[in-house]
Amino acid sequence: MAWHTVKDAQALTGKSRRTLYRDMAKGLLSWGFQGNGQRCIETSELLRVYGELKDVAQPEAEKVAHSGTPQNDTILAELTALRTEVHQLRDTLHRLEPTSPSKPSWWQKLLAWSSRRDR
């Protein structure tokens, strides 16, 4: 039979961690060590001491909507509309931002300097 950690044994039996450790300390529940030093309990011991074990539910697989379903079509339409709106808002923002005056080139600075000097 399989060996279970204390956490797994909790899920299988529905007993608290404290109860499991107390029963191990009293000698009611036999246990061993895993390679990493954790206590482990064999399935047959859990059955002997606590009776029938609970079914540990497996997580259900996610239901994925396929393309072409009404739910996906609605979400895609909304996504497209939001992207269009963001693009329009960015364009508006760029048009409203004040443009900084361009810096004069080196030759414009030279001409301005020489014209001031000639005065």
Image (cartoon, rainbow, N blue to C red):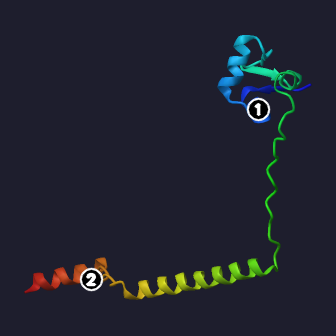
Residue 37 seen anywhere in this rendered image of the structure: no
Near mark 2 (Cα within 10 A), the count class, few <14, some 14-19 or many ≥20, is few
Which residue position holds label 2? 108
Near mark 1 (Cα within 10 A), the count class, few <14, some 14-19 or many ≥20, is some
Name the foreground residue: 35 vs 48: 48
Q: Is residue 9 above or below residue 119?
A: above
Name the foreground residue: 113 vs 9: 9
Q: Label 1's element?
A: helix
Q: Quadrant of residue 29?
A: top right
Question: What x and y, as percent, mark residue 61?
Answer: 82, 56
Q: Label 2's element?
A: helix
- The residue under label 1 is which amino acid type? Asp
Question: What x and y, as percent, mark residue 14?
Answer: 75, 34
Which quadrant would the C terminus be assigned to in this image? bottom left
Question: What x and y, as percent, mark residue 3?
Answer: 84, 24
Marks 2/1: CA distance?
A: 80 Å
Q: Which mark is residue 8?
A: 1
Task: Give left or right: position of 46 versus 104.
Answer: right
Residue 95 seen anywhere in this rendered image of the structure: yes
Label 2 vs label 1, nearer the camera: 1
Q: Quadrant of residue 42?
A: top right
- The residue under label 2 is which amino acid type? Gln
Q: Quadrant of residue 55?
A: top right
